[in-house]
Image (cartoon, rainbow, N blue to C red):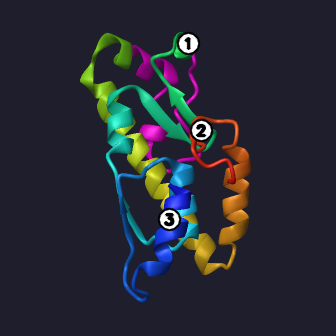
Amino acid sequence: MCQTLDQTMPYLPHGLARYLMGVGKPIDLVEAVARGVDMFDCVLPTRSGRHGQAWTWDGPINLKNAKFAEDLSPVDARVPCPASQDYSRAYLHHLIRSGEYLGAIVLSWHNTAFFQDLMTKIREAICAGQFEALRQQLSTEWSQTRSRPKTDPAI
């Protein structure tokens, strides 16, 4: 994705919004913003939620995994959303494993809030002239998670 953006962005008109469809992993969004993309849409937050995956500031987690069966911590307390803070990983694990659709709803809610929080932090960093520092921080923090791009070793 990054290589494609590097090759195509110079040919897009300047001064107009640049839209990227179907790209949704958090680090991909950060890298696309670094290359000049302004808008995104992707089904990843809700599709992931429907399948038991939560995107967190520590990387993605799969709440179907048995290790979450007794984990009473919130999905991600750093995300300003009731779904992220008020439901335990154990409860969501139970809902997902039981096929209760509430689990998919709560995880979709959380994931949407996480992505909104990420984009807010990106906008704030751009306004403060700190985007590159945020980009490096997130790249370092997410380098060992599944949120890292598989096809671009240069990041």
Q: What residue is rendered at 32% in x and 30% in y?
A: 50
- Is 136 located above or below residue 90 in the figure? below
Residue assigned mark 2: 59
Q: Give the residue type that dot 3 points to.
A: Leu
The quadrant holding residue 132 is bottom right
Q: Mark 3 or mark 1: name the one nearer the start of the chain.
A: 3
Residue assigned mark 1: 70
Q: What residue is rendered at 53% in x and 48% in y?
A: 79
Query: How far is mark 2 from mark 3, CA to CA?
Result: 24 Å
Q: What residue is rendered at 55% in x and 58% in y?
A: 2
Identity of the residue furthest to the left in this view: 101
Q: Give the residue type that dot 2 points to.
A: Gly
Q: Is residue 118 left or right of residue 83?
A: right
- Is 113 located above or below residue 72 in the figure? below
* Image position, residue 100 (x, y; %): 27, 18
* Element assignment for label 2: strand
Nearer the camera: disc 3 or disc 1:
3
* Element assignment for label 3: helix
Q: Which mark is residue 5?
A: 3
